[in-house]
Amino acid sequence: MAEEVLILSSGKITSHLTSSLLAVAFLTSFGSSMLYGYNLAVVNSPAGYIKDFYNRTVLSRNGTGLNEEALTLMYSLTVSVFAIGGLIGSLMVGTLVTKFGRKGTVVNSTVLVFLAGSLMGFSRICGSPEMVIFGRFITGIHSGISLSVVPMYLGEIAPKNLRGFLGLMPSIFICAGVFSAQVLGLHELLGKEEHWPLFLSLVVVPTFIQLMLLPWFPESPRYLLIEKHNVHATITALKWYRAKCNIQAEIEEMQEEQRSLSSVETVSVWQLLLDHTVRWQVLSVVVINIGMQLSGIDAIWFYTNNIFENAGIPAPEIQYTTVGTGAIEIVAGLIGCFTIERLGRRPLIIGGFGVMGMCCAGITLSLILQIHVPFMKYVSVGCVVGIIAGFCIGPAGVPFLITAELFKQSHRPAAYTVGGSLNWMSNFTIGFIFPFLQMSAGSFCYLVFCAICLSVAVYVYFVIPETKNKTFVEISQMFATKEAVEESQALTHPDQLKLKKMNGYGSLENGSLEFDSSSSCA
């Protein structure tokens, strides 16, 4: 039966955005990625109410309240413990996606959201700041898992010339989550003191919708074929996700990758780090994931209200200014999503980091000059908007997409574990130290972010190739060529080279020039 289905399909692989592909991208992003954005911004609006709750609770327990430094430390922990959970979640990704699959991991991890929502929702009734902090920690674990698994899942179910579009779908929902938290945090909605526990616990709503609908969709065809060796399930999944496409040609491309990995099991993180054949891919994942968080975007999201207050925006106008920035995030995310297949990955990520770097320098300049030039406070607001827009156009989603594209099936889970863990460690670092950095360095703290953004843009320009419309095998060979050039330069007789297969990737050794056809692209 499998052979009959394959013979019926002939011709080249075509790319059609089907309703099934769009539905899966929407459900996984809505119930997972959006929660990440929501949790980044949800503590911003009720910060004063949460601090008052902490102070009153400690006062009732000990008879004395918290001083300003202790209260800042406790609130910083509430903000940054989300990233600690994210780090733990990201370290679990490799094991979970191998055991439960991509879709299975997304579905099974929803239990964490319901647990966290219950803890935060009932924290005030129970008089327990610990429930807020622990709830934030658990939502971080869920976000750490989903932030890596969702792009991996979408990247594997998408045809190669829709991989960029679907791969950036989660970044749009991250922006939508931030915007939702900003709108719901308005005083007219849930921005009142009595509503902040409900505000924190609303994460359960999109997750419930996801849990009801996503299990009806198939698992990743690439996972089913390469890791589970289930051809019939692969064909069924492809027929579900494709319309008027060549199933045979797409399966042959996956089987070509499977043959190149026939002697290679899914590698561990340690094996990935020791594998010199993928050293440039690993280094690229490290740079873009650390740069994504150390760019200062989380400082902007976590402390938007404080930044606008320091910029001299009147207090009643701050919440509406913040909501306006959220709307711009969504627009910027849509621009990136709908232009990535035309422009490619490199222009979006280089341009995004470049804009962020210049705007970080602009914030420093405007905050210094606003004492003497009143209108400079609006320049600082414009720079904040520029940082957010630059981030959402490219750096918000492209690093996760590139992580999927730079590695074959055997190395991809470990690569996401490395990238995700570094991403969350950087997230925690920024969320925890930014208030203290701002107090000590003042306006000049943004120059640190400026240097990081521009450095990442330069690295991407010189090192990472364009991956648009390339198969995973072709992308691996592009980096194998980079390795070949470097090693040939180190040899005394560069004409004596042989390209051999090592862990499914190209590498060089002395001998005559040969090409192993088993690692050629489909």
Image (tube, rainbow, N blue to C red):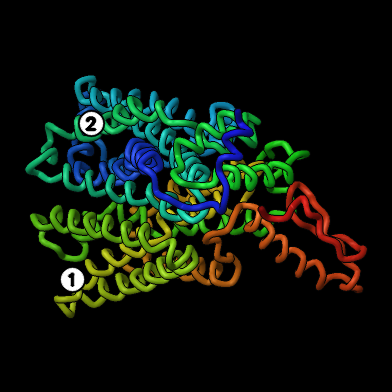
Residue 111, picture quadrant: top left
Tags 1 and 2 in contact by the CB under 8 Å rule? no
- Which numbered tag is attached to residue 378? 1
**88 left or right of 299?**
right
Q: Which comes before the other along the chain, label 1 or label 2?
A: 2
Frontmost residue, 30 versus 415: 30
What crowding class fits label 2: few (fewer than 14 Cα within 10 Å), some (14-19), or many (20 or more)?
A: few
Check disc 2 and report its element: helix, strand or loop: loop
Q: Point out residue 421 in the picture as x, y percentages from the top left corner.
A: 53, 44
Tell me if 72 is positioned left or right of 322 in this view.
right
Q: Assign a secondary structure to mark 1.
A: helix
Check disc 2 and report the residue beneath it.
Answer: 64
Position of 80 with respect to 221 (left or right) is left
Q: Type of residue at label 2?
A: Thr
The residue closer to the viewer here, 50 or 256, is: 256
Residue 110 appears in which quarter of the rendering?
top left
Q: CA distance from mark 1 to mark 2?
A: 41 Å
Q: In the image, what residue type sits under mark 1?
A: Tyr
Where 106 falls versus 405 (above or below)?
above
Which callout, 1 or 2, points to the residue nearer the camera?
Answer: 1
Q: Position of residue 41 (x, y in %)?
A: 28, 46
491 lies left or right of 453: right
Q: What's the residue at 55%, 43% (across, down)? A: 9
Q: Position of residue 312 (x, y in %)?
A: 16, 65
In the rendered image, the quadrant that contains the N terminus is: top right
* Residue visible at 32% across and 62% down in the picture: 335
Instruction: State how many labels appear.
Output: 2
Measured from the top left, where is residue 102 in percent x and y? Answer: 51, 34
Task: Kindly identify the residue that appears in the image at 59 percent across and 59 percent down.
Answer: 284
